[in-house]
Image (cartoon, helix red, strand yellow):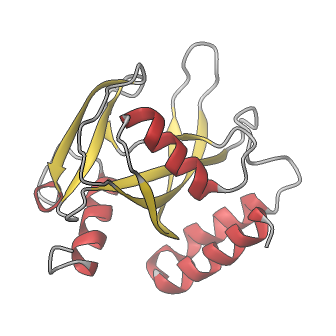
């Protein structure tokens, strides 16, 4: 199956799995069908990005990056830059931004969708990111390397994110989803 067709199938499945996000999934499907390439960052009306909800081997912690440009704690991720397999974009960005060895896609299903505004910076006008997020599992070696894209990286207990008022709302949503699906700590 072609990557764009696979993404359409994943978005339709996500829409069914998360009915409260059905309208958002539809907006992502609309973007996917746009004749202007939504996989390149030059499409300033909005474009796809891929992100990784990086979880520890035991599933109890997530690795967050203190994003240099946005100055917030977020999950690793970035632009597709023409790549249509957003799960691979998420994995690649996690590898590049964390330096963690042994990262792997958990199952390749969409874990979360988020549409967020990126403010103007360095001559690039403000624009929308349509972020498709996948679970990426770390191996036993949790030693990370801070890249130039981050101020810092930190392992955070997923349960603690739920009550952290400084935490981005989409991060709390992903924490709640993860915990609901993995109450036994897997």
At horizontal 58% and vertical 82% (from top left) the residue drawn is: 13
Q: Give the x, y percent position of residue 122.
A: 57, 13
Relative placement, left or right, of 9 versus 50 is: right
Residue 50 in sight in this render: no
Q: Quadrant of the N terminus?
A: bottom right
Q: How many marks?
A: 0
Q: In terms of image quadrants, where is residue 24?
A: bottom right
64, above or below 70, in the image: below
82, above or below 162, in the image: above
Q: Give the x, y percent position of residue 163.
A: 11, 57
Q: Give the x, y percent position of residue 52.
A: 43, 52
Residue 157 in sight in this render: yes
User: Which of these two is toward me, 157 or 68?
Assistant: 157
User: Which of these two is toward me, 74 or 120?
Assistant: 74
At horizontal 24% and vertical 79% (from top left) the residue drawn is: 180
**Residue located farthest toward the bottom when viewing the structure as drawn:** 16
User: Which of these two is toward me, 186 or 33?
Assistant: 186
Q: Give the x, y percent position of residue 41.
A: 70, 35
At horizontal 75% and vertical 42% (from top left) the residue drawn is: 82
Q: Quadrant of the C terminus?
A: bottom left
Relative placement, left or right, of 62 versus 124 is: left
At horizontal 73% and vertical 53% (from top left) the residue drawn is: 84
């Amino acid at each position: 199956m072609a990557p764009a067709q696979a993404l359409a199938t994943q978005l339709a499945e996500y829409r069914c799995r998360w009915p409260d996000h059905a309208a958002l999934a539809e907006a992502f499907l609309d973007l996917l069908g746009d004749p202007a390439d939504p996989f390149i960052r030059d499409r300033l009306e909005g474009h796809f990005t891929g992100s990784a909800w990086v979880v520890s081997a035991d599933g109890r912690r997530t690795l967050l990056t203190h994003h240099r440009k946005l100055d917030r704690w977020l999950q690793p991720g970035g632009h597709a830059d023409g790549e249509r397999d957003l799960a691979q974009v998420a994995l690649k960005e996690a590898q590049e931004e964390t330096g963690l060895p042994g990262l792997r896609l958990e199952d390749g299903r969409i874990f979360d969708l988020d549409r967020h505004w990126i403010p103007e910076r360095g001559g690039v006008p403000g624009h929308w990111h349509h972020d498709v997020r996948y679970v990426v599992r770390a191996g036993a070696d949790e030693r990370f390397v801070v890249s130039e894209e981050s101020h810092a990286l930190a392992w955070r207990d997923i349960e603690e994110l739920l009550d952290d008022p400084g935490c981005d709302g989409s991060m709390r949503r992903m924490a709640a989803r993860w915990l609901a699906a993995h109450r036994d700590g897997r």
